[in-house]
Image (cartoon, helix red, strand yellow):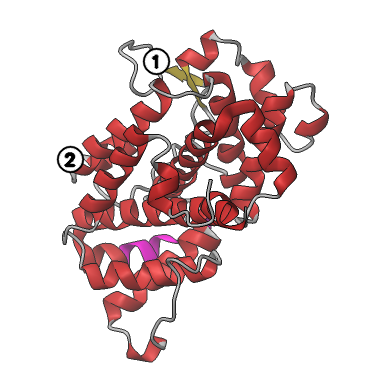
Amino acid sequence: MSTIPRVPATSLREAFALQPDLLDAFWDLYGTMWMDGVVDHPTKEIVRLRNARVTDCGYCKKVRFSVARDEGVDEGRAALVEDGYEEAGLPARQVAALRFTDRFLHDPSPLPAELTAELTSEFGEDGLVELGLGLAMFVGFAKMLISLGLEPPDMPVTVVATPGSRERLATG
Amino acid sequence: MSSAETFEAVLALRPELADGHARLTALVGDGRVDPALLALCRRRMGSLLGCDVHGGPTPPWSELSATEAVCLDFAERFVLDVHGIDDGLAARVVDGLGPGGMVAFTTALAVFDGACRFERTIVQRAKEV
């Protein structure tokens, strides 16, 4: 892990300032995925945190999104995304979403019928697409942050406004 | 989902997300980074991820320019071991593309990586139904 920025920036947002129209396009898409979605915020937050753990993104692991926090993803729940999540007491829909997450990250190959059926039963076809696009953004932009050397050397758990929301809870 | 699904058709189940993704994809490919260089990296990334749609053969290393070689190395590590991208490799990419080019390049890699995984898990699954 490098915490030495490789471009003149200290955060992904600052890096994107070098390409402001890319920032706008990214932020619009990310905000839409979060705030205009059909999948509940806690499930998307659990999936995001699983990606953060698997990808080992020092920033993503410490950030918490406000709406999911308000809807029950406290630190106890967030900790359940570690290996062994199948037996951790998470709701079945979130376990299914995490199995999809692991497939997406470790072995991107066509989803097996059983998992597809479970996911579409829980979230619908449009929800599965939303989860997939969310995962695509989580992994891609976590890697972008890592590859630009923008992981903070030390960062406390920090609640920030959910992308696309109008609130401003960012602290720390 | 039918057997004739494409990435765009599947993503169209969420039109506002499809529109946003298409906008972002178009921007990263608008020439701010050499499109041929991005196509080269996308083919290699697609191959590494088993994605027939985006993957394809790439020239031998000996036939690549210095910038192509260093960017392709970066793209491979982006897929396989992103923490293995060291400061020296990143600096060589910045030398070739400039800081703004580096941001655009890594944005493109982020979009490609995610799109290939989406293609493999969801679109390919739909084709097999």
Provide residue B104's location: percent of width, then percent of height. Answer: 25, 53
Provide residue A70's location: percent of width, then percent of height. Answer: 52, 8
A88 lies above or below B126: above
- Residue drawn at x 75%, y 38% is A83
Which of the two labelled residues, at mark 2 and mark 1, occupies the earlier sequence position?
A: 2
- Residue drawn at x 44%, y 24% is A37
Secondary structure, mark 2, is helix
Residue A98 sits in quarter? top right
Q: Is residue A142 left or right of residue B63?
A: right
Residue B49 sits in quarter? bottom right
Span highlighted in magenta in the image: B83-92
Q: CA distance from mark 2 to mark 1?
A: 24 Å
The single residue placed furthest to the bottom in the displayed view is B62
Provide residue A63's location: percent of width, then percent of height. Answer: 49, 26
Secondary structure, mark 1, is loop
Q: Are marks 2 and 1 in contact (CB under 8 Å)?
A: no
In the image, is residue B27 part of the stretch drawn in magenta? no
Judging by the rendered image, the residue that carries numbered circle 1 is A171
B69 lies above or below A153: below
Provide residue A126's location: percent of width, then percent of height. Answer: 49, 33
State whether residue B72 appears in this view. Answer: yes
Judging by the rendered image, the residue that carries numbered circle 2 is A20
- Residue drawn at x 38%, y 22% is A36
